[in-house]
Amino acid sequence: EAGVAQSPRYKIIEKRQSVAFWCNPISGHATLYWYQQILGQGPKLLIQFQNNGVVDDSQLPKDRFSAERLKGVDSTLKIQPAKLEDSAVYLCASRLPRVNTEAFFGQGTRLTVV
Amino acid sequence: RKEVEQDPGPFNVPEGATVAFNCTYSNSASQSFFWYRQDCRKEPKLLMSVYSSGNEDGRFTAQLNRASQYISLLIRDSKLSDSATYLCAVNRVEYGNKLVFGAGTILRVKS
C-alpha cells in the first residue's frame, strides 16, 4: 500500500515570499490533516479536512496560510507571505474517518525561511 | 492549559531499564488515545493505540486512567533502538476526529 506522499521534501525561501506544499493521502482516506512541527515541539494541527470540507482550521493563521482539498483527494497548503517563524516541518497525515484508526504521516516538507 | 501535556524529558536510561511516561489531557470527553514514536528528522509512526482496559505489545504497555485523565506508556528492558521522541495523541470524536498531539517526551537509552 502506498503511503502518504508529500512534496517538496525541502524548501528554502526568503521572508515575504510564497510557498506551497502538496500532499497525496492514502487512497480511501477521507480525513486529511496538516500539521506544523517546529523543532523541539510536537505537531500542531493547522487544518483538518473530511473529504473536501474543512472540519477544523482554528489554529491556521488565516492572514497568511491557506489550504484546499478541492476534489477530496490531494491537498495543498500555501503560505503567503512567509515569515521567519514559519520555519518548520509541515506534516500531512491521513486516516479513515473512524475513531480508533491510525493516522499515517508523510515524510514532511522541511521549510526554512531566511 | 494545553489540551495534551507531556513531560519533555529527556529521560536518560541505561539499556535494560524500565521507563514510564505520562501524558495528561484536559478534555474529559476525549475518547481515544494513541502513542506515536518519532525518530530524529522522521515522521511520527503509530506505536500503540490505548484501550480502556490497557494493552500490551511485547515490551510496551499502555494504560488509560479516565478518572485522572492521563495515559501512560511503560517500556520494559529498554533497547538502544528505543531512543526516540514519544508523542501522545488524543482523538476528539466530537470534533470530527480531531487528533491533537502533545509536545513529546525524549527518551535516550545508553549502553
Image: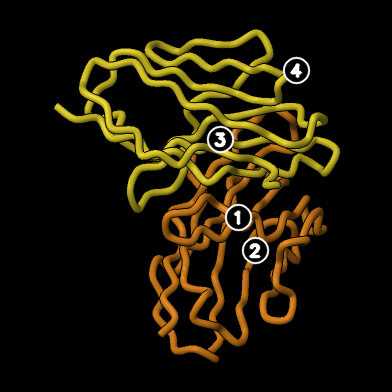
Chain colours: A orange, B yellow
Q: State whether discs 3 and 1 lie on one chain.
A: no
Q: CA distance from mark 1 to mark 4?
A: 26 Å
Q: CA distance from mark 3 to mark 2?
A: 26 Å
Is B63 in front, or is A80?
B63
Q: Are marks 3 and 2 in contact (CB under 8 Å)?
A: no
* Circle nearer the viewer, 1 or 2: 1
In 3D space, how far apart are the residues under numbered discs 4 and 2 (Cα atoms)?
39 Å
Q: Position of residue A85 (x, y in %)?
A: 52, 75
Residue B67 image label = 4
Percent of width and height locating residue A26: 58, 46
* Residue type (three-letter) at the residue carrying disc 1: Lys
Identify whether B39 is placed above or below B78. below
The chain letter for the residue carrying disc 1 is A
Foreground label between 4 and 2: 4
Q: Are marks 3 and 4 in contact (CB under 8 Å)?
A: no
Q: Give whichever of B105, A7 is nearer the camera.
A: B105
Tell me which label, 1 or 2, sits earlier in the chain: 1
- Measure how far apart labels 3 and 4 are at the Cα level: 18 Å
The image position of residue B53, as x and y in percent, is 65, 8
Amino acid, disc 4: Ala
User: Which residue is tagged 1?
Assistant: A44
Q: Chain of mark 2?
A: A
Element assignment for label 2: strand
- From the image, tell me which residue sits under label 3: B88
| Label whose residue precedes the other's in the sequence (3 or 4) | 4
Q: Position of residue B1 (x, y in %)?
A: 70, 47
